[in-house]
Image (cartoon, rainbow, N blue to C red):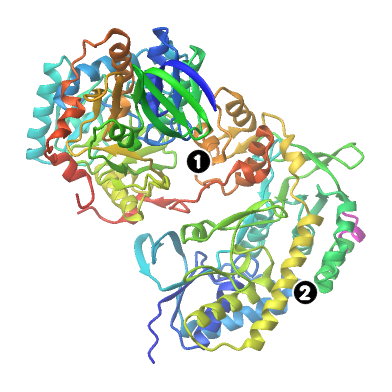
Amino acid sequence: MSRHTADVVIVGGGLIGVWTAFFLARRKQRVVLIEKGVVGAQSSGTNFGNLRLQGRFPGQYPLSLRSQALWEEIATLIGEDCEFAQTGHLYLAYDDEERAKLEGYAQVSESHGLAIERLGSSELRKRWPWLSERAVAATFSARDATANPRLVTPAVARAARALGVTISENACVSDVARSGDGFSVKTAGGAQWSCGALVNAAGAWAVAIAERFGETAPIVPAGPPQFVTEPFPYLIEPSIQAIDGSVIFRQIPRGNIILAGYPRTAADPVNHRAPVPPAKTLAAMRALARVAPILAQCHVIRVWSGIEGYLPDMIPVIGPSLTMPGLFHAFGFCGHGFQIGPGVGLCLSEMIVDGGTATPLEPFSIGRFRESVAVSEKFRKEFDGA
Amino acid sequence: MPCVAEIVVVGAGPAGINAAERLCAHGHRVMLLDEGRQAGGQGYRRPSSGLDLDMAALMGTEAGKYEALHARFAGLLPQIDYRPQTLVWAVEDRTLHVVQAGVASTLRFDALVLATGAMDKIAPFPGWTLPGVFTLGGAQVALKDQGCLIGRRVAFLGSSPLLVLAATQYRKLGGEVVAIADTTPFARKLAALPALARSPRTLWRGLSYLGGAMLAGVPVLHGVTPVKVVGDGHVEALILRDRRGRERCFPCDAIALGYGLKPETQLAELAGATLRFDEAFRLWLPQCDADGRAAPGLYLAGDGAAIGGADAAEASGGLAAMALLADLGEPVDERVRLVLRRRLARLRSFQKGLAQAFAWPVAQIRALPDEVMLCRCEEVRIGEIRQAMAQQLGPVEINRVKAMTRCGMGRCQGRVCGPALQEIVAGAAGIAGEQAGRLRAQAPVKPIALSVAGEAL
């Protein structure tokens, strides 16, 4: 067995883990990141790539805006732009009830300083003439963006490695235990790490680590199905989402249209399978043709998914363990971790190095699962039979 | 006892027709799904209706079999539920997802026979994406389906017994064959002779085509290395290095490129078949027993199961049907089964011999220069693969390489570039072809239009 020491060990090489490693390394910490497979393989690499600011959980705006500022300088931070494009996000309402919901979201966004443009039916048609008549109103946020999730996590991992982080891929954590003031982490390959702080960023697999220290969260592993069409002449600049959740789509400059739609599908974290049932492919295709009839003859060429951890209140766990000093959790991002990833990494690095962060993260404490947590309407709506 | 099993056969080539025929003879109502407009598959393809083509001349020694299969199909047609122009795009549990006449629907089945056939196996080289370069199979489809030649002066390049066959067909229809150029050295063909001699009739047919071409003065080259296609917007010449290393230029206006066939295994994979890397063919092939059983209720036949050619497809279609019947508890004629098994084993081992005599050019592919286009759909060059793999935390597994580079992500889903990508990845990583992993199949196995999903509610 090889023995090593580090300041911080991070378990999980998803987007959260690599950004945390990156910011810790910038603060001169000796960091080890352990990943059971390869970095960015699950939902970090297979998500829709949306950096959406509209319509987020209200308590998340300070974190979200801080994160967007990091995304806006990603090329400077890590030396690669990962196809970051600030093309805006258009939220569509199909009826008056949805229009009222949009207005509610818009007011929350504006109270946090985001510029929201409200569009009626005729303005919508003027700016995007191909939009179907069913869209009766919309809100547009120009600061929202997209990036290529397949590229981001490996690129951040490379930048972290350049700053001295040890990245151990294909290494499965076999044991985690308290050791003195810190932790001892063993891998199946026979390595043992002693560290002062431990970050649990193991996504859908994170609860096993929390439970080693007497904490838990009711995580549901699931995969958001994603679809892509053949290239079509470039037409759609912003990311477009129907507020009923039936479809979200964007076009990349190459011409392909990426689309996703609820409900999400239960995944198998043991065998690493996140299936995409054909019926969901058809449902997403129908939903896209309904809002953009011009695409009716466009072909879907590929589908994919990846495993993500969901929690019943549809907000993540971020912050210190309540049972074990030096342990920090960041998991269960419920399908919206991509945008806040860099911000979460920065906040965790501040908590570990400075003992705290100025960004309010109280709503995300793991402590909320000590009592039974209400199942959110969003969770009910976005899952099969949930 | 009334028969309740829902049996679906996918593919109406010789394998699918034989399977349907035998199941039908046992009183089963069979549904036969076919992506084509007319039954026959690729090899026994019928010309488009209204086209007066001399198929007897075109099919040559195989004309009798061609006519016989189509006559049998005509007799079978009233007894089966035949659905042409039907794409099966997904298999899930015991349900097929199909698109027919632009509308998506589902079909339940209890037993499934997949006779999905094969497509061309392609090795890229500089200029292969220039208009005028066709796959060898595509060149034959143009001929049989439309009565068209791909050009007036055609070069046949690759490594496949079908090069000389297709060249013969082209000459019959008045095309000029400027060269038949095979990448496998002649010595390797001689070494494979003992295996090939097990099917003397087929071997003789191949040699007679070759002899005919040589007598007609067509340059026939072995052990060549393709250098490039030259032309301004269209093929103007093929440049290659002959076995002595001399550069040769063949002016032409079209090139038929083929390195043998590659089974269409996507549906088998989705239906639960296990795939294994085959060193002889250097392809991932579905695993099944001698009769085609691949999983409970799943039977594979024809070139989609293992490359064997039309005669093997006929035998394996019959065997798959007999396996299905036996699994339903129905009596089958053991003597017939034994004859078919022997025939199939002989034909498939002949194909293994062919795979040596007409080898997949592993070394040539791995040595291709960086600027060669590998993935036509997503326009990914070989250098981009090597560069992505060489960087820090670079991918070494083929699906991961696809995720990082887009190679294999486009319309064809790696069906064209997959085998070459396998070699490029293995070569760059310094590992065996098998260790590079397998591009996973997923539905839709072919592109489907948004409109097939139907009207929104």
Q: Residue placed at 55% from the left, 35% from the top?
A: B401
Q: Residue placed at 48% from the left, 60% from the top?
A: B272
Residue identified by numbered label 1: B409
User: Residue B129 lies in what quarter of the image?
Assistant: top right
For the residues labelled 2 and 1, the Cα–Cα distance comes to: 41 Å
Q: Position of residue B211 (x, y in %)?
A: 89, 63
Q: B366 above or below A151?
A: below
Q: A34 above or below A72?
A: below
Residue identified by numbered label 2: B61
Q: Is label 2 or label 1 in front?
A: 1
Earlier residue among tags 2 and 1: 2
Quadrant of the drawing holding the N terminus of chain A:
top right
- Crowdedness near tag 1: few (<14), some (14–19) or many (≥20) residues, C-alpha within 10 Å: many
Near-viewer residue (A335 or B101):
A335
Residue B236 seen in this snapshot: no
Q: The magenta stretch spans which residues?
A: B212-218
- Residue B213 drawn in magenta: yes
Q: B152 above or below B423?
A: below
Q: Secondary structure at mark 1?
A: loop
User: Residue A156 lies in what quarter of the image?
Assistant: top left
Q: Position of residue B166 (x, y in %)?
A: 74, 60
Q: Does residue B456 appear left or right of residue A232 in this picture? A: left
Q: Mark 1 belongs to which subunit?
A: B
- Residue B250 drawn in magenta: no
- Residue at the extreme front of the image, as rendered: A180
Amino acid carrying label 2: it is: Thr
- Crowdedness near tag 2: few (<14), some (14–19) or many (≥20) residues, C-alpha within 10 Å: few
Amino acid carrying label 1: it is: Met
User: Residue B42 lies in what quarter of the image?
Assistant: bottom right
Q: Does residue A21 appear left or right of residue B320 in this picture? A: left
Q: B375 above or below B161?
A: above
Say if mark 2 contacts mark 1, CB within 8 Å: no
